[in-house]
Image: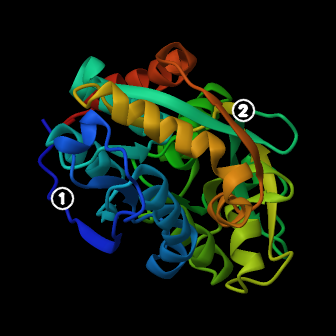
């Protein structure tokens, strides 16, 4: 059972559109929609990306919409379990955790399709561009950071597949830590605090490193990828099964229409790297669930696990 303290801090509320004449039935019981965002992204960046989407949803759906930041990835599951969130985008490993905790109460709705038609992304091991490290083998005895224990690309996939390739993280690196988020990992790497980190990228033009460089938070070309995982299915936007179907349908319709109805909002929310959304189903994440379950079983086998 999760015991982590949930830290919810609202980023902003938008009033419902006063021009909406016809009220659907679900609006009689749902007076506010809460969308969960993990604190893995820094607050200023989260506001810049999400606030236009909040504005759009409030006008489109006709009820106030609020963004909530949570303390970590597992906080999204806790909030959904407590009926404190209506919608959130879950990383695949967080979705796996959510299904273990919530079962069918957690429902996937849709996921990104990038500009190349790809419905997924990759975990990558990144080093500083001026370092001598060219392969994971070169990081023997070096310091390494994962992002979060419930991150797919920042922990589950690299821990699982590196071990399958003969690099047990606990034995191969001099020490491993959880940085608290992808931004933290890459920023610390560039500052010289770690020799290697695990993060994610969609392609060579889109990912954590590219986003931080675009915002001037790290120099362009400051890092280099030395390892890439198999494809991870794109993170599902998810909801609670106990919500009115009319609300879920309205949310999906609004998000699907955002690119055409509010192209600037869509571009800001997706960093310009998403072409459209596609339906997501539970079966899409069975491989990720298998990876996370094996890691959990391994953890429990350790003394004190």
Q: Do the residues labelled 2 and 1 touch (CB within 8 Å)?
A: no
Q: Earlier in the sequence, mark 2 or mark 1?
A: 1
Crowd around label 2: few <14 · some 14–19 · many ≥20 (10 Å): many
Q: Which quadrant of the rendered structure holds the C terminus?
A: top left
Direction from residue 158 to residue 206 in the image, left or right: right
Secondary element at image label 1:
loop
Residue receiving disc 2: 119
Q: Is mark 2 on a helix, strand or loop?
A: loop
Q: Between 295 and 116, which is closer to the camera in this rendering?
A: 116
147 vs 246: above or below: below
Q: Can residue 188 be seen in this view?
A: yes
Residue 108 horizontal side relative to residue 110, left or right: left
Residue 39: image location, x then y, percent? 39, 66
Looking at the rendering, in which quadrant would you find the N terminus?
top left
Name the residue located 32 percent from the left edge and 37 percent from the top edge: 24
Count residues near mark 1 (Cα–Cα under 10 Å), then give few for <14, some for 14-19, many for 20+. some
| Residue 186, percent from left and from top | 62, 70
Q: Position of residue 92 (x, y in %)?
A: 50, 34
What label sits on residue 6 in the rendered view? Answer: 1
Which labelled disc corresponds to residue 229?
Answer: none
Vertical position of residue 267 compared to residue 113: above or below: below
- State the residue at coordinates (57%, 18%): 284
Residue 97, can we see it?
Answer: no
């Amino acid at each position: 059972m999760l015991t982590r303290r949930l830290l919810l801090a609202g980023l902003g509320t938008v009033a419902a559109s006063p021009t909406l004449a016809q009220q659907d039935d679900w609006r009689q019981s749902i007076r506010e929609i809460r969308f969960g965002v993990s604190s893995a992204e820094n607050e200023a960046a989260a506001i810049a990306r999400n606030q236009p989407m909040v504005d759009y949803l409030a006008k489109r759906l006709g009820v106030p919409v609020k963004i909530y930041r949570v303390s970590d990835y597992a906080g999204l599951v806790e909030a959904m379990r407590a009926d404190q969130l209506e919608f959130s985008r879950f990383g695949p490993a967080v979705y796996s955790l959510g299904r273990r905790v919530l079962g069918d109460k957690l429902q996937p709705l849709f996921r990104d399709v990038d500009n190349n038609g790809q419905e997924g992304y990759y975990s990558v091991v990144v080093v500083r561009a001026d370092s001598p490290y060219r392969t994971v083998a070169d990081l023997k005895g070096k310091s390494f950071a994962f992002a979060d224990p419930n991150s797919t690309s920042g922990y589950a996939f690299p821990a699982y597949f590196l071990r399958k390739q003969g690099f047990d993280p606990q034995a191969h690196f001099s020490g491993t830590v959880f940085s608290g988020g992808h931004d933290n990992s890459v920023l610390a790497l560039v500052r010289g605090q770690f020799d290697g980190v695990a993060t994610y990228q969609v392609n060579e033009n889109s990912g954590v490193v590219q986003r931080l460089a675009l915002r001037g938070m790290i120099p362009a070309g400051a890092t280099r990828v030395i390892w890439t995982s198999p494809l991870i299915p794109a993170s599902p936007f998810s909801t609670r099964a106990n919500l009115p179907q009319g609300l879920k349908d309205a949310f999906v319709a609004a998000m699907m229409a955002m690119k055409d109805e509010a192209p600037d909002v869509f571009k800001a929310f997706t960093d310009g790297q998403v072409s459209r959304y596609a339906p997501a189903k539970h079966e899409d994440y069975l491989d990720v669930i298998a990876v996370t379950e094996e890691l959990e079983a391994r953890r429990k086998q350790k003394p004190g696990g």
